[in-house]
DNA sequence: GAGACCATGTTGCCCGTGGCCACATCGACG
DNA sequence: CGTCGATGTGGCCACGGGCAACATGGTCTC
């Protein structure tokens, strides 16, 4: 009946409610405060109900992480759009993406933690015993392996968005440059979360980071430039 | 490790044994596998014994993290020493530090996770009820606040080591450059752990990273060099 | 329309863990 | 020798995770 969500059966659509509530709790009290039972309590359902939608706690966190990456990616895309196609300096789109990334990370610290954790651990999900009660077709989050794959894909997309924001009309960017740029942005977000910036305004640092990446880009268009230290190049 | 441990009373020196075993388990099975009771079991002591040395699970993880940072910092220092004072290019010490960081991170993935987590969360440690049985003088890891401070200090030291490895005899480096460099290295380690490098050999990327940072360093001694369009950053 | 069927939700259970207690040791120190 | 404090023990309770058997209320098919 109406709406895109499959409008579930007898109760409300729990899955969504669960994720929503979990998101709030996560933001407010951190990942450790997230427990399936507590969510169940808060939503007024039985303690085992969440189990129908998330095989275990891990699955819930993975789902949150996936949502997080989706939101982050959406924001990165929006930022490039807003920054327009290309400008005189060429770095404005990249700069916008960097700011978007840092902004998102700054606003969603606990979420970012969960996202990192989910991407890092393989989520083995013992294949032997695939939950008998919950294994039908589209229930409780297909297997962990799948979730891991989707997470990896979402994560990779962030990298791609960043890398492509660096491309000027002139030509494609060395993918390794994209990696470097992404690493720098991500690392900066991390340090900011660790409160390691020691007074330096984040905006300044982003400018510096963009500048740094951009300079690296300018002088090696020809490729083959190994960076062992002797590049006597510079303005 | 250090012989400074006070060689405890009736049993062995549990604290050290605990940390050692925990380190192994962490490396082998990840942080989730770490439980105080399990450690107690494996070391043949009662389930409450670890509680004498670590107020709670968190305290244990913090201690591991602290050890981790100490080890990492030691390795960073060793790397600069080995790279000699200064070389023609000037980047060799920084490059060595970068490699050391990446090397350590690559070898101790789970530890790095724990280190990050510990540094990120405040470790509130409700001050009201300061465990009555365990609060004497030098027992069970002074309060969490202290642990947090020590962690932050250790972490900061890594940044300082990195930054100072960039200094040539010519003069001190803009601390923000140090931050950028550190962020890039750390971010790269993160991406490597996430297996996001897509075939690009890590060594190449480190070269590129070092090169990128170095180029940024060369041309802005005088300040004022901005590379992005908008953002009229202050002076 | 009746019955199979399946997704969803409920109650109940076991087990491991955390965190606390009161108590037992054992060495140090007066 | 007696006290004390650091250390380790056993016991206890609450909580969360994860299963399993059962209940419910839709959908689908004949």
Image (tube, coloured by chain):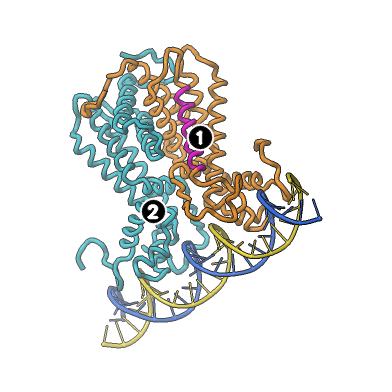
Chain colours: A cyan, B orange, C yellow, D blue
| Disc 1/disc 2 C-alpha distance (Å) | 26 Å
Left or right of A137 on screen, residue D4? right
Residue B99 got which mark? none
Residue placed most toward the observer, D9 or A90? D9
Residue A128 point in image, percent of width and height: 52, 60
In the image, the segment drawn in magenta is B146-164
Quarter residue A155 falls in = top left
Quarter residue A50 falls in = bottom left
The answer to whether residue A169 shows anywhere in this view is no
Left or right of A139 on screen, residue C1? left
Magenta region includes residue B154:
yes
Residue C15 point in image, percent of width and height: 58, 66
SS for dot 1: helix
Q: The C terminus of chain A appears in which quarter of the rendering?
A: top left
Q: Looking at the picture, does residue A204 appear above or below residue B196? A: above
Residue marked by disc 2: A29
Residue placed most toward the observer, B126 or B83? B126
For the residues tagged 1 and 2, is the chain the same? no
Residue B7 point in image, percent of width and height: 71, 42
| Chain letter for the residue marked with disc 1 in the picture | B
Residue B99 point in image, percent of width and height: 50, 28
Residue marked by disc 1: B154
For disc 2, the neighbor class at 10 Å (few under 14, some 14 to 19, many from 20) is few
Q: Looking at the picture, does residue C2 appear above or below residue B155? A: below
Residue placed most toward the observer, B78 or B210? B78
The answer to whether residue A42 shows anywhere in this view is yes
Is the magenta region chiefly helix, strand or loop?
helix
For disc 1, the neighbor class at 10 Å (few under 14, some 14 to 19, many from 20) is many
Q: Looking at the picture, does residue A87 appear above or below residue B3? A: above
SS for dot 2: helix
């Amino acid at each position: 009946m109406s709406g895109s969500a499959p409008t579930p059966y007898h109760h409300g659509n729990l899955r969504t409610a669960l994720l929503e509530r979990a998101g709030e709790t996560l933001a407010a009290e951190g990942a450790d405060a997230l427990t399936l039972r507590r969510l169940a309590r808060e939503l007024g359902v039985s303690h085992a109900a969440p189990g129908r939608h998330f095989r275990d706690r891990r699955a819930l966190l993975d789902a949150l992480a996936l949502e997080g990456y989706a939101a982050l990616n959406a924001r990165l895309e929006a930022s490039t759009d807003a920054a327009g196609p290309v400008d005189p300096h060429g770095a404005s789109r990249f700069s916008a993406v960097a700011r978007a990334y840092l902004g998102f990370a700054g606003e969603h610290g606990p979420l970012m933690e969960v996202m990192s954790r989910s991407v890092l651990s393989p989520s083995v999900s013992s294949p032997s015993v695939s939950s008998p009660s919950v294994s039908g077709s589209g229930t409780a989050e297909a297997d962990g392996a799948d979730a891991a794959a989707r997470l990896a894909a979402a994560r990779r997309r962030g990298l791609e968005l960043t890398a492509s924001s660096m491309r000027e009309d002139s030509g494609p960017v060395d993918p390794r440059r994209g990696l470097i740029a992404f690493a720098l942005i991500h690392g900066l977000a991390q340090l900011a979360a660790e409160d390691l910036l020691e007074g330096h305004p984040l905006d300044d640092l982003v400018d510096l980071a963009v500048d740094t990446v951009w300079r690296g880009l300018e002088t090696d268009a020809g490729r083959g430039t190994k960076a062992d230290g002797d590049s006597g190049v510079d303005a």
